[in-house]
């Protein structure tokens, strides 16, 4: 029973890392501005660079629940409806993150006397989940547009996400290439954080073994 709990906790740890990585890149303006330069956004739209930055801050603050989408009236009703749906998904992700942290901390605290075995199974579970996730990402990368579309059809029960470049500031700021690049950043960051967590676990396991020998 304990082994199963440890394995499930390892899966939770990996998904917590993934959610943290998604949140980091989605709610920080620098990741947007880097992509704007990369995708020549400033040259391809009529808004000034200052307006683009303020629109971006407005979008991020809206997702953080700190503002309404009201900057100079640039957002259409369809865009507002879509961003409302996006914000709802972010809020669900936030609650999942909080619940995951609570469960992980509870399991670690309840089994602190079995820390060596617990961390060992954590690492096995995290590694297995990471490998499966990497394989899934590799499949998605073969046809990103197909799976990007499928994601929207699954998570949105309307067609508000189908925005036209002629009418939508959001689709001009955040084209498909934006999401491709951000997805790579999220993937790489999640892998790095996973390696760090697993390394810390291994360090603690080795230290515990040395303490027992002494």
Image (tube, rainbow, N blue to C red):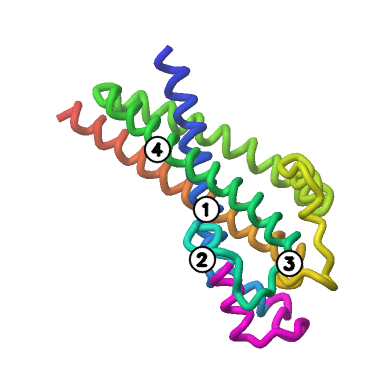
Q: Main secondary structure of the magenta part?
A: helix
- Membership of 42 in magenta stretch: yes
User: In the image, 170: left or right of 115?
Assistant: right
Are the two marked residues, 2 and 4, in contact with CB atoms closer than 8 angstroms? Answer: no
Q: What stretch is highlighted in magenta?
A: 38-58
Q: Residues within 10 Å of mark 4 (few under 14, many from 20)?
A: some
Instruction: Give how far apart the Cα atoms at labels 2 and 4 are.
Output: 22 Å
Residue at mark 4? 101
Sequence-first tag of 1 and 2: 1
Q: Tell me the SS state at disc 3.
A: loop
Task: Pinpoint residue 177: horizontal percent, then vertical percent.
Answer: 75, 65
Instruction: Give how far apart the Cα atoms at labels 3 and 2 are.
Output: 23 Å
- Membership of 187 in magenta stretch: no
Q: Point out which mark residue 60 bears.
A: none
Residue at mark 3? 76
- Residue depicted at x 55% and y 58%: 63
Residue at mark 2? 28
């Amino acid at each position: 029973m304990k082994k199963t709990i440890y394995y499930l906790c390892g899966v939770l740890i990996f998904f917590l890392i993934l959610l943290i990585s998604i949140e980091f890149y989605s709610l920080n303006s620098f990741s947007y501005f880097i992509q704007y330069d990369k995708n020549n956004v400033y040259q391809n739209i009529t808004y000034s660079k200052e307006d683009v930055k303020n629109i971006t801050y407005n979008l991020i603050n809206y997702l953080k629940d700190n503002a309404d989408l009201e900057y100079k009236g640039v957002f259409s009703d369809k865009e507002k409806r879509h961003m409302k749906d996006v914000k709802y998904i972010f809020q669900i992700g936030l609650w999942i993150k909080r619940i995951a942290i609570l469960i992980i901390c509870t399991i670690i605290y309840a089994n602190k006397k079995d820390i060596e075995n617990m961390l060992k199974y954590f690492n096995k579970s995290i590694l297995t989940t990471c490998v499966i996730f990497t394989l899934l990402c590799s499949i998605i990368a073969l046809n990103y547009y197909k799976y990007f579309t499928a994601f929207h059809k699954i998570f949105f029960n309307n067609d508000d996400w189908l925005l036209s470049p002629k009418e939508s500031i959001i689709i001009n700021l955040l084209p498909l290439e934006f999401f491709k690049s951000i997805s790579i950043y999220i993937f790489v960051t999640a892998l790095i954080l996973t390696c760090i967590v697993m390394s810390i676990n291994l360090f603690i396991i080795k230290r515990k073994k040395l303490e027992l020998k002494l």
